Amino acid sequence: MPLPTPQPTPRRSLTRRASSRSQLATRCANVPGRRSAKTALDFSCAAALLKEHWEAVTDAAARKPDGDYISDPALLEAIRSSINHESVAYRFCLPIQLLGKVTNPALDSLRLQKKRGDPTDVTGWDARSLGRKVVAPFNQEQERVLGSSNDPYVGNPMRIPRMVRDDPSKKDVAG
């Protein structure tokens, strides 16, 4: 049975999920309007989510500078390894992929590309455009902490349809 064709999700507005930990928007909710299903992401909503979460994190860190926000040492090391990688594409990878998933939870966070012309591909998306249009400009506002790229996924490391562990085409990167 084929997957349903995504219906147009015109405009999106921020929605909030009540939580004892925070009142941050966690996704963009579908609202009738002008968007097409082809895009799969509302970049203005993604930018608003990124800004809102960044402000919450920096405010929390200012109030509690010695706070330990990630208790799992392996996860902490994986994050540090990613955002401090020698390749700019890998430094941007975690923020871009997570922002895509937070913006639209139906998307596959390991996907980097949408299958062109395949209406059954409902979890694919254009991660490169999110990086170029939302994350890179935001990074420039934050003193280019991830690097100076205006298009972080333009190079070879992210020219794959989906990230997989031990990808044979990525011999320079473990895992």
Image (tube, rainbow, N blue to C red):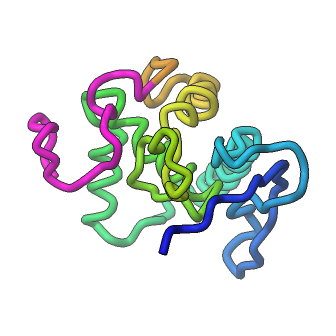
Return the x and y of residue 56 as percentages of the image width and height.
69, 55
Return the x and y of residue 30 as percentages of the image width and height.
80, 60
Q: Residue furthest right?
A: 33
Q: Which residue range is magenta in the image? A: 152-175
Residue 55 seen from this side: no
At 51% from the left and 18% from the top, the residue drawn is 150
Classify 31 as above or below 21. above
At 68% from the left and 63% from the top, the residue drawn is 26
Along the viewing direction, whichever of 130 and 26 lies nearer the viewer: 130
Q: Residue furthest front?
A: 1
Residue 67 seen from this side: yes
Along the viewing direction, whichever of 87 and 161 lies nearer the viewer: 161
Classify 113 as above or below 138. below
At 27% from the left and 56% from the top, the residue drawn is 77
Return the x and y of residue 104 as percentages of the image width and height.
63, 58
Classify 98 as above or below 150. below
Residue 148 is left or right of residue 31, and the answer is: left
Classify 146 as above or below 77. above
Residue 172 is left or right of residue 107, and the answer is: left
Magenta part mainly helix, strand or loop?
A: loop
Return the x and y of residue 121 as percentages of the image width and height.
50, 55
At 77% from the left and 69% from the top, the residue drawn is 23
Q: Residue furthest bottom?
A: 20
Along the viewing direction, whichever of 32 and 87 lies nearer the viewer: 32
Residue 6 is left or right of residue 171, and the answer is: right
